[in-house]
């Protein structure tokens, strides 16, 4: 018989059960209400009537006649905990439960995660049916993983309210603990948009389930001429357990009595009487030790009558259908039956022809607006690295995309859009940081980079006319000139003092009292000797004494070293442009106060300095924070413009990839030093996005095929006629291979000045000589100058006659007249020389 028992009145429940026992019963199945379980089990234990439990119990009451086919609550709780931790791998989630019994059922989940550093929020339903306010609060916390424990008939209502507050989306996952969730129609929740995970004890693929359901439908149709409306997939747990309980009791009854022809009868029992049913305890004991295959799987019990070693199936509702993806068994834990390939195939199927929203911001070279604006539609309005990269990914994964710009064009708005899930993806120069990963998910980096310094390029100096003097400083040239003059004077003084330096100017004449000695080391000769040495040309003047030779040797050694050093540096100074800046690293910036430096306000670069443990970077952050006016800018573009206008008085920290792009197109900028850290740009996604794995796989494929590098070269390299790197390379080649007049013009100036000076001295010497000739020969200076110029301009005449005074010429003519006939001038000269020799 079937009794409708009160859920709260234990006294009324007891009276009705006693009335049923008085009429005679062989077993009691139930009750359904947890509050009535205690009184029913107590009466059955007293009367020794088998009590088969097929409903969940809050607390198990051990007894000799109580047999529970429904899995023990602690076992179900352990299954839920194992699925959450080892199957779903949830590290943070929200527990949403309906009643206190549900919280007790989930105690194993809380115990398993309570000792670990995991974030778990526990919320209970508010009184009444409307749970929207509670669900809004959960949605505001950005929680996407929800463990829902409530009665089966309330699941759909709660999910519908969650959909109303946008707590149902592709980024949300639900784990519903009710074992009958598989009987609900979840198709209204946009198949493929939300992942529902649940447990069920009935395996619709089991042969016993299929045969039993077919038997029911056939019998029902036979008697009622209409369909039962039940399939193997929609059989409720209560129905399956009821079938198994009846089948278990019938099997025990046949095995204990009917099969062995023993007597069996149902007796009328009184609750107030101590008389017990003699057949009840043997039946209960036999059911405890027996095993059978039922609609809920293998049925077996421990000594206390609790079901043990049962199996629960992990089922997921995705892409519009329930699929068995794993199983859990007592003592074995959870096991996955769905391969990663199958899981990826389901995600791939859900992405087919799906349009994803891609949030981005304007910023070269990642995204720019195509001209003319307003005439193009959709993604055609934009161009850049981000558009090309997302297009390649969309081709591989198989989805459509739509670019949308954030209003403020800031990175923070991109992150906020992903948190609010108004965008499915976000791409730009979005750096992967620890702080951002707390709020959103990232793909693998599609570009590696680091923080570097953008600084103005030093102005190229015009080549100096006297660049050949640059190898030595002014001080060195002064010291060399002083040494030259000092050594010349010393050589002159030592030559005056040393006897060895004084020699007979007429070696053929013996030194007498009227003779004299001369030295070659006059002041002018000393200067000429040292000049020849320093010019590596030498001279005919050679010191004779030990002292003068020692001074000359030391001077030669000095000139050897100086000329070698000068020659070694001269080539570098003539061929290389001196573009040495004041700043070459971050340490150089930190040590000085002349050049200001800053970052983009609120960006990852500013966060690097703010959170750094390095003493240098800490000091730099303090300097930046205290600078007045502020050294921070609102965007990288503002930072680039500030560097260009500062004329070397401002340096800007930004990502190395952005610096590469700017330096390639702005020839007055340069990157200084290496990178301060190592990080990467990634594509942002909402937390727990199902697209992350597919997008990562596409990025990895593009990287292996070299597409990422090709895209970077396409958007980072400027055209040949605009490329600063190409211009610098060509200028460097020209500078290193050819010397212009600007490099060696000073040498020509010295040559011209020297030759003009020499010509001037020659003219002066000529005029002075003409004056002397005019005085000696008693002619006019003009006549003397004319005579000398005629001789100088007659290039065919290589012998110049000696000019004599007129008195000497008249005397010589008188002597020639007085010579005897036949005596020539030559013989006369020999006679005169012999007389001079005899006289000597």
Image (cartoon, rainbow, N blue to C red):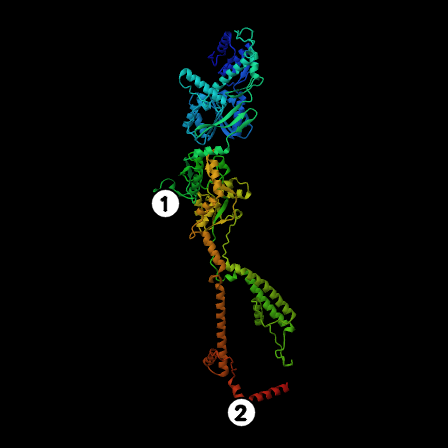
Label 2 belongs to which residue?
A: 817
Q: Quadrant of residue 480?
A: bottom right
> In the depicted view, which residue is nearer to us: 667 or 464?
667
Q: Is residue 192 left or right of residue 82?
A: left
**Numbered disc in front, either 2 or 1:** 1
Q: Are marks 2 and 1 in contact (CB under 8 Å)?
A: no
| Quadrant position of the C terminus in the picture | bottom right
Q: Is residue 66 left or right of residue 156?
A: right
- Residue found at the very far left of the displayed protein: 375
Residue 706 to residue 556: above or below: above
Q: Is residue 420 visible?
A: no
10 Å crowding of disc 2: few (<14), some (14-19), many (20+): few
Residue 670 to residue 763: above or below: above
> In the depicted view, which residue is nearer to us: 341 or 209?
209
SS for dot 2 = helix
> In the depicted view, which residue is nearer to us: 282 or 741?
282
- Which numbered circle lies on residue 250? none
* Residue 451 drawn at (x, y percent): 50, 44
* Residue 304 drawn at (x, y percent): 57, 17
Residue 23 to residue 247: above or below: above
- Residue found at the very far bottom of the displayed protein: 821
SS for dot 1 = loop
Residue 113 to residue 718: above or below: above
Q: Earlier in the sequence, mark 2 or mark 1?
A: 1
Q: CA distance from mark 2 to mark 1?
A: 114 Å
Q: Is residue 298 visible?
A: yes
* Residue 379 drawn at (x, y percent): 39, 40
Label 1 belongs to which residue?
A: 371
* Residue 626 drawn at (x, y percent): 49, 42
10 Å crowding of disc 1: few (<14), some (14-19), many (20+): few
Q: How many marks?
A: 2
């Amino acid at each position: 018989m079937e009794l409708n028992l009160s859920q709260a009145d234990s006294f009324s429940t007891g009276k009705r059960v006693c009335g049923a026992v008085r009429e005679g019963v062989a077993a009691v199945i139930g009750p359904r209400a947890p509050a009535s379980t205690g009184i029913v089990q107590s009466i059955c234990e007293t009367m020794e009537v088998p009590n088969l439990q097929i409903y969940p119990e809050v607390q198990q009451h051990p007894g000799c006649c109580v047999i529970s086919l429904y899995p023990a609550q602690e076992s179900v709780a352990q299954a839920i905990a194992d699925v959450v931790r080892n199957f779903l791998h949830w590290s943070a989630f929200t527990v949403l439960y309906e009643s206190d019994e549900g919280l007790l059922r989930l105690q194993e989940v809380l115990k398993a995660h309570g000792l670990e550093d995991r974030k778990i929020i526990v919320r209970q339903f508010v009184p009444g049916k409307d749970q929207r306010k509670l669900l809004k609060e959960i949605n505001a916390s950005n929680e996407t993983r929800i463990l829902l424990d409530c009665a089966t008939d309330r699941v759909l209502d709660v999910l519908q309210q969650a959909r109303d507050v946008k707590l149902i989306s592709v980024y949300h996952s639900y784990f519903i603990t009710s074992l009958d969730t598989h009987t609900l129609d979840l198709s209204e929740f946009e198949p493929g948009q939300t992942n529902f995970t649940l447990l069920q004890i009935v395996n619709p693929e089991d042969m016993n389930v299929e045969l039993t359901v077919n038997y029911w439908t056939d019998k029902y149709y036979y008697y009622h001429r209409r369909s039962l409306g039940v399939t193997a997939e929609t059989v409720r747990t209560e129905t399956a357990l009821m079938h198994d309980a009846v089948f278990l009791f019938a099997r025990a009854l046949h095995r204990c009595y009917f099969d062995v022809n023993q007597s069996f009868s149902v007796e009328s029992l009184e609750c107030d009487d101590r008389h017990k049913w003699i057949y009840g305890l043997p039946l209960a004991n036999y059911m405890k030790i027996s095993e059978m295959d039922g609609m809920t799987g293998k049925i077996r019990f421990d000594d206390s009558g609790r079901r043990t070693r049962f199996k629960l199936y992990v089922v997921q509702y995705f892409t519009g259908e329930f699929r068995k993806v794993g199983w859990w068994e007592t003592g074995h834990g959870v096991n996955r039956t769905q391969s990663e390939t199958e899981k990826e195939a389901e995600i791939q199927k859900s992405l087919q022809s799906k349009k994803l929203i891609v949030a981005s911001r304007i910023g070269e070279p990642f995204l720019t607006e195509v001209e003319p604006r307003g005439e193009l539609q959709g993604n055609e309005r934009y161009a850049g690295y981000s558009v090309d990269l997302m297009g390649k990914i969309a081709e591989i994964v198989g989805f459509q995309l739509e670019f949308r710009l954030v209003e403020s064009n800031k990175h923070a708005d991109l992150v906020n859009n992903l948190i609010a899930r108004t965008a499915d993806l976000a791409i730009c120069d979005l750096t992967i940081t620890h702080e951002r990963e707390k709020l959103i998910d990232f793909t693998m980096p599609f570009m590696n980079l680091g923080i570097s310094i953008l600084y103005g390029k030093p102005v190229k100096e015009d080549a100096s006319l006297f660049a050949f003097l640059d190898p030595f400083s002014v001080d060195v040239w002064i010291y060399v000139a002083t040494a030259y003059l000092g050594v010349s004077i010393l050589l002159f003084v030592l030559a005056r003092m040393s006897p060895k330096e004084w020699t007979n100017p007429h070696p053929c004449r013996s030194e007498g009292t009227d003779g004299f000695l001369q030295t070659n080391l006059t002041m002018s000769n000393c200067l000429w000797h040292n000049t020849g040495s320093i010019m590596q040309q030498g001279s005919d003047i050679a010191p004779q004494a030990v002292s003068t030779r020692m001074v000359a040797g030391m001077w030669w050694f000095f000139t050897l070293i100086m000329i070698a050093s000068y020659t070694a540096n001269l080539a570098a100074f003539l061929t290389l442009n001196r573009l040495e800046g004041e700043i070459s690293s971050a340490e150089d910036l930190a040590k000085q106060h002349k050049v200001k430096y800053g970052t983009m306000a609120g960006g990852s670069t500013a966060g690097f300095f703010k959170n750094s443990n390095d003493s240098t970077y800490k000091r730099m952050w303090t300097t930046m924070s205290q600078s007045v006016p502020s050294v921070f800018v609102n965007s990288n573009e503002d930072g680039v413009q500030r560097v260009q206008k500062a004329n070397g008085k401002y340096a800007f920290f930004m990502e190395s990839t952005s610096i590469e792009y700017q330096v390639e197109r702005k020839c007055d900028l340069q990157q200084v030093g290496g990178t301060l850290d190592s990080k990467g740009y990634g594509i942002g996604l909402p937390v727990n996005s199902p697209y992350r794995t597919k997008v990562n796989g596409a990025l990895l494929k593009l990287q292996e095929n070299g597409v990422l590098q090709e895209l970077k070269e396409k958007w980072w390299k400027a055209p040949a006629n605009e490329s600063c790197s190409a211009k610098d390379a060509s200028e460097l080649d020209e500078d290193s291979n050819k010397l212009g007049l600007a490099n060696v013009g000073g040498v020509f100036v010295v040559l011209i000045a020297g030759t003009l000076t020499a010509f001037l001295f020659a003219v002066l010497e000529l005029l002075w000589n003409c004056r002397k000739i005019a005085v000696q020969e008693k002619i006019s200076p003009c006549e003397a100058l004319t005579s000398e110029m005629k001789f100088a301009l007659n290039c065919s005449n290589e012998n110049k006659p000696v000019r004599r005074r007129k008195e000497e010429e008249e005397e010589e003519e008188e002597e020639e007249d007085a010579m005897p006939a036949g005596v020539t001038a030559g013989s006369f000269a020999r006679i005169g020389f012999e007389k001079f020799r005899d006289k000597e």
